[in-house]
Amino acid sequence: MKRRVLITGGAGFIGSHVVRLFVTKYPDYQIVNLDALTYAGNLENLLDVKDLPNYIFEKGDITDEAFIDQLFGKYQFDGVIHLAAESHVDRSIMDPLAFIRTNVLGTAVLLNTARKYWKDNMDDKLFYHVSTDEVYGSLGEEGFFHETTAYDPRSPYSASKASSDHFVMAYYHTYHLPVIISNCSNNYGSHHFPEKLIPLAIHNIKNNKPVPVYGKGENVRDWLYVNDHARAIDTIFHKGRIGETYNIGGFNEWKNIDLIQLLCRIMDQKLGRPEGTSAQLITFVKDRAGHDLRYAIDATKLNKELGWEPSLQFEEGLEKTVDWYLTNEEWLQHVTSGDYQNYYQEQYQKR
Ligand SMILES: Cc1cn([C@H]2C[C@H](O)[C@@H](COP(=O)(O)OP(=O)(O)O[C@H]3O[C@H](CO)[C@@H](O)[C@H](O)[C@H]3O)O2)c(=O)[nH]c1=O
């Protein structure tokens, strides 16, 4: 079946991997990538697919109602995969309103427009909302997030994503809009903006700069290779049940400090430095406000119902990621100029 799919946030980290997978795997689909190209959106992420005949890029803001309406009119989408979002927790602490605007209002504008265009015929339509495991809050040392876990967001970022999830379900229950939500754990891989832990640490180690570890580095995250997340989104988009939520994760929990130690060992090997060199850059800094202790997500439903499972072991994925950053210096140089510099100067002045 031919489909006309809108992917929002397709120039971002996870979005670009989803766009690449869809345009190469489904040559019959028309894929429209809508991205506002703010600081973390970068068309360089898609240079290898930008000339494919089934790929179209549109620059625009999901909060701009008139623009979104005109876009739906122009392309008559039958599917939406919504990834556009402000995603960095530390930024949300500094500027919560930006997160409410994009993540809550932007999602509501998309939902409302999809409802307007699809209301007379909902057959074969799908609004797929890509969300986060952070909506479930913070775990103690035991247990997992399940699809039935009550929402308990604790940062402005996770509150904005939780709110957008609620709007998605409200449109399902109230207007019968065909929706699916997935909530995924921490991603890592190529094209990740170096404000997040793994690409920031790689960038800093390479440049002999301090690697900031918040608090004592005891916080735990569950890491998934970004290509595996993109594969999960593909599976859920095509086989998921309407009105359902699917958790995505790798059963791959790491304490931040253990992860950084592993990364330091890999970097020493790759850069030909004596073992232990990079670890000397580890610097414990002031903790993140309201820092969630542990995320761990149970992806059994996705595995049992739809047959998805991660394809890569963490060590292998991390090595591939390091290799990508070390061979794509131009990309790193480009994205670490401008806004990035201002942001980090501001961050470090505060410490
Ligand atoms: C940037 C940075 C982070 N950290 C810590 C904070 C967290 O415990 C852990 C990972 O931080 P981040 O890379 O910012 O990711 P985290 O806050 O977990 O959130 C990520 O994962 C979420 C999914 O769980 C996504 O929804 C978010 O968009 C994504 O940013 O490392 C440090 O210790 N030092 C740092 O410099």
Image: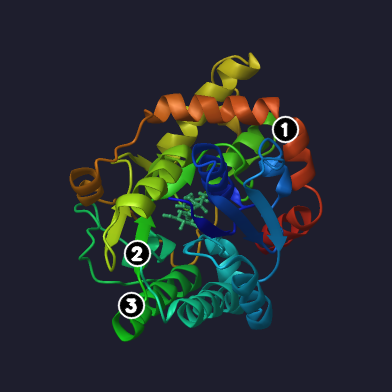
Nearer to us in this view, 270 or 274: 270
Q: First in sequence: mark 1 or mark 2?
A: 2
Q: Is mark 3 within 8 Å of ligand 1?
A: no
Crowd tier of the residue under label 3, counting other residues whose Cα lies within 10 Å: few below 14, some 14–19, many 20 or above = some
Distance from disc 1 to disc 3, alpha carbons, whole Å, reads 49 Å
Crowd tier of the residue under label 2, counting other residues whose Cα lies within 10 Å: few below 14, some 14–19, many 20 or above = many
Residue in view at x 50 percent, y 78 percent:
117
Q: Tell me: residue 229, above or below residue 261.
A: below
Per the image, label 1 sits on a secondary structure element best described as loop
Q: Amino acid at mark 3?
A: Tyr
Q: Tell me: residue 142, above or below residue 116.
A: above
Q: Is mark 1 within 8 Å of ligand 1?
A: no
Instruction: Give the percent coordinates (x, y) of residue 141.
Output: 23, 52
Q: How is the image coloured?
A: rainbow
Residue in view at x 67 percent, y 64 percent:
350
Distance from disc 3 to disc 2, alpha carbons, whole Å, reads 9 Å
Instruction: Give the percent coordinates (x, y) of residue 341.
Output: 77, 53
Q: First in sequence: mark 3 or mark 2?
A: 3
Please name the residue that numbered disc 1 is placed on: 207
Q: Tell me: residue 71, above or below residue 346.
A: below
The quadrant of the image that shows the C terminus is bottom right
Q: Amino acid at mark 1?
A: Asn
Residue in view at x 65 percent, y 40 percent:
210
Please name the residue that numbered disc 2 is placed on: 180
CB under 8 Å between discs 3 and 2: no
Nearer to us in this view, 215 or 34: 34
Q: Does residue 176 appear left or right of residue 53 in this picture?
A: left
Instruction: Give the percent coordinates (x, y) of residue 157.
Output: 50, 69
| Residue 160 numbered mark, or none | none
CB under 8 Å between discs 1 and 3: no
